[in-house]
Image (tube, helix red, strand yellow):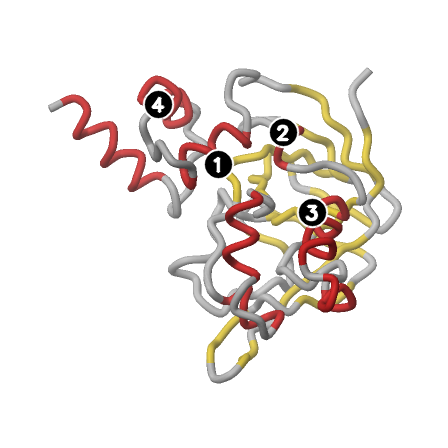
Amino acid sequence: MHPKYEIKGLFSSTPGEIKGTATSIKMTPVNELVIKEHGITGNEMANNKYHGGDMRVIHHYTGKNYEHLKQVFPELADKFVPGSIGENIYTDELTENDLHIGDIFELGTAKVQITVPRKPCHKINLAYDDNRILKEVLNSRHVGWFYKVLEEGTVKLGDHLHQIDRPYPQLGISDFLEQAFGKSRFSNINFLQDCYDTGLMDKGWKPKIEDVLAHHKI
């Protein structure tokens, strides 16, 4: 039986500023998201060069990831609430260890596919007003992940994320993150080639992987 996960939070963003830096990381709770191929209706990015795009339509973060941050930074526990790290959908369950690149889900009436894990930046520190957070998010690999849209639709609070297929069982998100941030960075050429061949790499990861693969072929 394919697992289902209840949607406990939905969020949309409007560009704003934190300490003079433009960002959309602060999210607004909503009851419904209208999911289109090229983006979520009303979900605006502060910087389209590094954010958004067809491979990053939906960002997912979870209660298990927030719980880790609460344990590491108990003095900031009240800040680690759903929507605070820039996600569009929130579930209690799941971590990066449970998922694979290319996993396909029904999300409300939409159908979506995992593309890549998030490549977080310093704006996470701005969101929590603490310069330690980004480092811990990277070290713990609790970065969240993105979906592209296979079929447009809507998702409401209380709907479910229902996994229906895993076309690339050899491409674990945790394995990808180890290549990205681990001690032997971008060293598993066969794995990186397989990731690239899915066609699911986004603008944040694709150039680096292309560069690694090109140098390996020389």
Among the 4 quarters of the image, the one containing residue 101: top right
Among the 4 quarters of the image, the one containing residue 5: top right
Between disc 4 and disc 2, the foreground one is 4
Q: Are marks 3 and 1 in contact (CB under 8 Å)?
A: no
Q: Give the mark count.
A: 4
Neighbourhood count class around disc 3 (C-alpha, 10 Å): few under 14, some 14–19, many 20 upward: many
Callout 1, which amino acid? Leu
Q: Which residue is mark 1?
A: 177
Comes first in the chain, label 3 or label 1: 3
Element at label 1: helix
Among the 4 quarters of the image, the one containing residue 41: bottom right
Q: Are marks 4 and 2 in contact (CB under 8 Å)?
A: no
The residue depicted at 19 percent of the width and 24 percent of the height is: 216
Comes first in the chain, label 2 or label 1: 2
Between disc 3 and disc 2, the foreground one is 3
Instruction: From the top left corner, tell me how far across and down residue 173 is, in percent.
Output: 54, 31
Between disc 2 and disc 1, the foreground one is 1
Q: Which residue is mark 4?
A: 188
Q: Which residue is mark 2?
A: 99
- Between the residue at mark 2 and the residue at mark 1, the CA separation in whole angstroms equals 12 Å
Foreground: 103 or 209?
209
Callout 4, which amino acid? Asn
- Between the residue at mark 1 and the residue at mark 4, the CA separation in whole angstroms equals 12 Å
Comes first in the chain, label 4 or label 2: 2
Comes first in the chain, label 4 or label 3: 3
Q: Is residue 22 above or below residue 184?
A: below
The residue depicted at 51 percent of the width and 67 percent of the height is: 123
Instruction: From the top left corner, tell me how far across and down residue 31 is, in percent.
Output: 83, 59
Element at label 3: helix
- Between the residue at mark 4 and the residue at mark 2, the CA separation in whole angstroms equals 19 Å
Instruction: From the top left corner, tell me how far across and down residue 151 is, in percent.
Output: 64, 35
Q: Which residue is mark 3?
A: 65
